[in-house]
Image (cartoon, grey):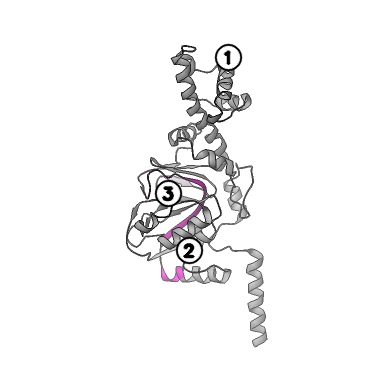
């Protein structure tokens, strides 16, 4: 009987190794289905992996311009405002890794913890999303707006998050240890509020699942752009288009001001569909200002083909 018990434990252990850590996550096939417009590289769990270069470029674009691109494409539920931040001038930009929390219930929490621990997860369920983070990720959690006893992060977890992701967080909930976390250089948190309480009566019901953040829908792998105005969640398949268009809008404003000031073109010409002459002048102008970036004629034509502004 003792040998049979050991054999059963071994079979269960091998089973969990073969399926990987599945508790609270959706199947890889479902995540690929939900993000099927994304045609690029993916993480092992199916989450879209937006290139690092796009993330770096996204840090410099205006959230208003990015929102306009999404709105014109029909994506009208991607922005959420009214946040408190640790720092007003530290943007949080990266790939969304999502978590969904709910009020705890003894039987449900007990079952979730037992399964998670059997699968190899450690500690309380609020640490599980943190263990999944990789560089460039943004931990996005729906804590259903809970403030008192809704602190999803304190100084220790903030340090762990930053060490794993090199990034900050967006919580529809609260955080604690504000004075200590402030000292973590480069880290920022967008939360509903700060509170001295400890996390209580909350359980992780979803990891890397679609979540709601206020009025916005967020899918794993979305491009998160969190700045002083608020947080924009860009679907992965639109990330490059949004970034490229927002970059161009900023360049177009500088170019247009210079052209109007020197009387080479009128405001009407700059704000209308561009002729080939204006396009060529823009490319040549940009070549003379390498500090502003690079753009080929092909890239310019692609951006302008979707122009609705």
Label 3: few (<14), some (14–19) or many (≥20) C-alpha neighbours in 10 Å: many
Identity of the residue drawn at 64% across and 87% down: 2
Quadrant position of the N terminus in the picture: bottom right
Q: Which residue is mark 3?
A: 213
Identity of the residue drawn at 55% across and 39% down: 239
Q: Earlier in the sequence, mark 1 or mark 2?
A: 2
Name the mark on residue 277: 1
Residue 157 shows up from this direction: yes
Identity of the residue drawn at 46% across and 59% down: 159
Task: Give the residues drawn in magenta, as a range.
Answer: 85-109
Numbered disc 1: secondary structure: helix
Q: Nearer the viewer, mark 1 or mark 2?
A: 1
Identity of the residue drawn at 41% across and 61% down: 155
Numbered disc 2: secondary structure: helix
Provide residue 51's location: percent of width, then percent of height: 60, 43
Provide residue 263's location: percent of width, then percent of height: 46, 11
* Residue 210 falls within the magenta-colored stretch: no
Q: Which residue is mark 2?
A: 127
């Amino acid at each position: 009987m003792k040998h049979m018990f050991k054999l059963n434990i071994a079979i269960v252990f091998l089973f969990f190794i073969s399926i990987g850590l599945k508790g609270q996550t959706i199947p890889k096939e479902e995540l690929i289905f939900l993000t099927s417009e994304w045609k690029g590289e993916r993480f092992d769990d199916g989450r879209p992996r937006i290139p690092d270069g796009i993330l770096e470029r996204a840090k410099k674009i205006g959230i208003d311009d990015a929102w306009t691109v999404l709105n014109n494409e029909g994506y009208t539920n991607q922005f959420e405002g009214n946040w408190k931040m640790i720092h007003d001038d530290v943007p949080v930009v990266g790939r969304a890794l999502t978590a969904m929390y709910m009020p705890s219930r003894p039987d449900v929490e007990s079952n979730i913890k037992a399964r998670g621990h059997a699968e190899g997860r450690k500690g309380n369920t609020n640490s599980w999303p943190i263990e999944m983070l990789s560089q460039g990720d943004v931990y996005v959690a729906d804590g259903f707006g809970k403030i008192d006893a809704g602190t999803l992060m304190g100084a220790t977890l903030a340090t762990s998050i930053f060490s794993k992701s090199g990034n900050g967080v967006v919580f529809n909930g609260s955080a604690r240890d504000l004075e200590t976390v402030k000292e973590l250089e480069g880290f920022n948190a967008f939360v509903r509020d700060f509170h001295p309480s400890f996390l209580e009566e909350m359980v992780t019901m979803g990891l890397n699942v679609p979540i709601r953040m206020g009025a916005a829908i967020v899918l794993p792998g979305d491009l998160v752009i969190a700045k002083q105005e608020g947080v924009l969640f860009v679907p992965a398949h639109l990330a490059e288009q949004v970034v490229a268009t927002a970059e161009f809008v900023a360049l177009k404003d500088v170019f247009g001001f210079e052209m109007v000031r020197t009387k080479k073109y009128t405001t009407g010409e700059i704000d209308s569909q561009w002729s080939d002459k204006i396009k060529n002048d823009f490319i040549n102008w940009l070549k003379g200002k390498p500090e502003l970036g690079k753009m080929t004629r092909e890239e310019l034509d692609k951006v302008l083909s979707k122009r609705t502004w």
